[in-house]
Amino acid sequence: MSEKHLTKSAWETEAKKHHLDDKTLSKALGTYEKCNEEDLPAQEKALDEVDKAAGALKKNKAYKEVADYLDEVADACEHAQKELAKRIEEEEAEEEDGGGDEELAELTKDLAKQLKAAMGQVKGHAPGDPIEPGVAPEPGKQLKFLAYVAGGATSVIVAKRVGGSTRKLAAKLAGVSGGKYHSGDCIYEKNAYTFVLDQPPGGFAHKVSVALQEETGQKYKVRVRSIDGLVESDDETDAPPVDPNAQTPPPPPPGPPSPLARELAGKLQALKADLQKAAAAPSGHEAMAKFTEAATLLKERHPDEAAALLPEVEQAIKKALAELAAAPTGDSPDAAFKQRLAALMPAIKEAIAAGNTAGTEIKLKASEAGAKAKQHDFDGANVSLDEIEALLGGNQPVLDEALFKQRLTALTPKIKDAMATQSPEAASLRAKVGEASAFAKQHDFAKANGALSEIEIMLGAPGLATGSEKKFSLVDLQKSRLSWVNLRSLIQSQLQELEAVILQTVRAHNADETAEDEFDEAAVASGVKDLSAKLGALDERLIDKLDEALNAQTDDVRRARHAEAAVIIKEYQAFAASSETLATVDLNGFTQSSIQSAVQSTLAELAAKF
């Protein structure tokens, strides 16, 4: 379920794919999209119409193929109705106690002071440990936030309560109409001000960070995550890419450093050796961020603030070094589980983003695996990962169902022609079709597909192997396609992580006044992106070719696409064997990478099939 399910364009695209022509739901969604953000009654009425229209279509047998999508529309509608009800309740409460205008006046009078005080309270209420994914912060102990995002303009308010008056102020601060509101809890977690909401939009952490700095004049380390913990970002990794052509004015010539500045520079220089070791620990990025912040303050001639931050830098480095000392060996259950989960995460995220039934099940299994691991139940956690692998591998009923529908659609014309002959074989064929239909009604699509295979033999339909010809499995083709998609996702994910760590290291080095040289950050960013380009030979051609094979209407065509796919795999293997980039990327020294091993194992597996 996502917000896209409440858009007219998404529904019309889905309906068009299945050759459906609906006006009722399309009209209701269009009306909802046009509602003013502040007109709550209009939104309430529009959502009711959407819910009714989706429910009516769900009962219509002609819309059976989009039943799952209509369920997603209903879920999204229910979520929006709950959020709307909360807003209405908040505004009614403000009207009853008369506190709305006073709250607005108090915030408007000295917003910077109020926000700084609120952020101080957030940090003071920090929980001892990070809140478990899937668990919302405890009510009453944390503050709320409201963000208003309209294009490039963003405003943020943190307070004990957010409601109608806060919305008015947020829109006024942004100075732009037609924006969207986002609200949730603001907590202090993982050494950052963490904004927790149901579905964080892209770039949200960076936008919140910039807005807070503009409103308070103070830089805060901002982190954003979803309640279930599966979506997480911070203001550094979430920032827009560096523009290599951007021009910045030269800084004024610096004066001589103060005695305190010289003393701090020496202390930071002494910490650099431990910092480099600490970077490999799970919390190493926190130590790096603290060091960078202190070095930047010192470089910008704020030695007093840098001195106040130094104990936090030392403590963060100490914590990271302790984690390394206590790190489990590679053979421990903890390390083995983490390694498996890290390898699966790109495919898990892609499945969840698809927004289908399988993705929802995978999301639940991932949360379940994480919870068991935190309880040190690694046997149970690995069982959950086994189930995730099975779902990702296409063994779940969802994929079987899709395959059954695809095959039945292709066979239906031939089945009708064969039954029209009234031959003795037609009776047997009719019985077998009834058997396949019965299995499908019982949602046993594995057996239903088996019945279709028997029907293909009875019809002499394409897909049946004769003599020495090879019999093609659509399931194997789909698994091969998924393997290549997962590999490309893993490469992209690990390269993005490597880029972020390299740039963070460069920033820390450049911020260090004791460093004798300085790197060109834009040039480094361009060089890291060039790394992705050098691995671009592992492209999407195989995906396209396997799609052609899956959609082929005859076995001869499928055999030809199969042979072409084998040629592409050989090209990939030749590239993997000769690429210096691929041979060295796992030895980068910044992050743990498994790109080379994943490429080699996946290509070997595919080559064996083709």
Image (cartoon, rainbow, N blue to C red):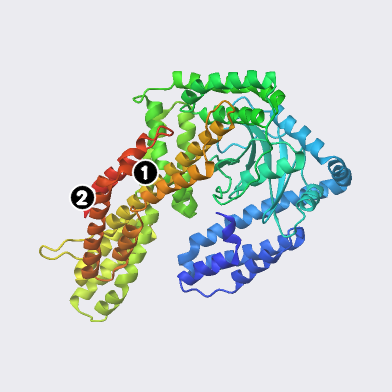
Give the mark toward the camera: 1 or 2.
2
Can you name the residue that lies furthest to the bottom here?
421
In this rendering, the answer to whether 118 lies above or below 403 is: above
Mark 1, secondary structure of its residue: helix
Query: How many other residues sit within 10 Å of disc 2, few (<14), some (14-19) or many (≥20)?
Result: few
Quadrant showing the N terminus: bottom right
Q: Is residue 130 visible?
A: no
Expressed as whole percent of the image width and height from the top left, the position of residue 399 reads 37, 56
Of 89 and 166, nearer the camera is: 166
Quadrant showing the C terminus: bottom left
Name the residue tied to disc 2: 608
Expressed as whole percent of the image width and height from the top left, the position of residue 191 reads 61, 29
Image-quadrant location for residue 267: top right
Residue beneath the point at 45% across and 41% down? 365
Residue beneath the point at 58% across and 29% down? 512
Expressed as whole percent of the image width and height from the top left, the position of residue 93 reads 82, 46
Image-quadrant location for residue 184: top right
Of 67 and 280, nearer the camera is: 280
Q: Which mark identifies residue 389?
A: 1
N-term mark: 1 or 2: 1
